[in-house]
Amino acid sequence: MMTRLLRAMRLLISGGEVLRTDWDRPLPTAQLATFGATTVDRVPIFGPFGVAYRPPSGSRVLTAAISSDPSQMAILGAAHPDVPLPDLAEGECALYAQGGAVLRLGLDGRVHVTGDVVVDGDAEITGDVFDRIGALGRLRTIFNTHTHVAAGTPTTPPTTPDI
């Protein structure tokens, strides 16, 4: 009885290494080499709702076996020894990928992005936009008030439609 209980407890939380993943299913799965030296196929990959991740081969995973049944194993989290974690202060969190992109929620209340940003859709910004030279609002003000000299007389400032 005690041996059976200990086995069940060992199976409840375990781990392994990702051999490959299958992303062509309604629920992504992985093939694992468990720490017990067995290969397990089609282990579902779970994460928080709204967060999708596909751990690369060689990732170490934390698994749970529902009711201590190894045929009902699921991946609860993954980390790869060759993919460095982003530098975080205590209290910060981040999404990061193997390619180096990082989306960090900073202690300063700002969202810090490392990597290029591609927006597939409209972007609405309620504040000003800044680059290395200055603010877009300042550039717009300069443009809207500039004039040219034509035939010795300054032109009127350009008119910009209300957007």
Image (cartoon, grey):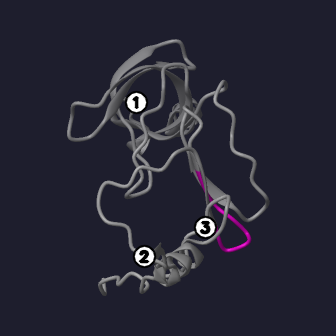
Q: Is residue 141 part of the magenta span, yes or no?
A: no
Q: Earlier in the sequence, mark 3 or mark 2?
A: 3
Mark 2 is on which residue type?
Ala
| Residue at the disc numbered 2 | 151
**Badge 1: how crowded within 10 Å, few (<14), some, or many (20+)?**
some
Labelled disc at residue 130? 3
Choose mark 3 or mark 1, whichever is in front. Answer: 3
Residue 115 x/y as whole percent = 57, 44
Image-based side of 5 in relation to 106, left or right:
left
Residue name at image x 57 percent, y 20 percent: 35
CA gap, disc 3 and disc 1: 54 Å
Task: Tell me the residue that label 1 is attached to.
Answer: 70
Residue 156: quadrant of the picture: bottom left
Residue 23 at what x, y percent from top left? Answer: 29, 31
What amino acid is found at the position of numbered circle 1 in the picture? Pro
Where disc 3 sits, the SS reads loop
The majority secondary structure of the magenta stretch comes to loop
C-alpha distance separating marks 3 and 2: 37 Å
Q: What percent of the width, then of the height, locates residue 4?
A: 51, 32
Magenta residues? Answer: 103-110
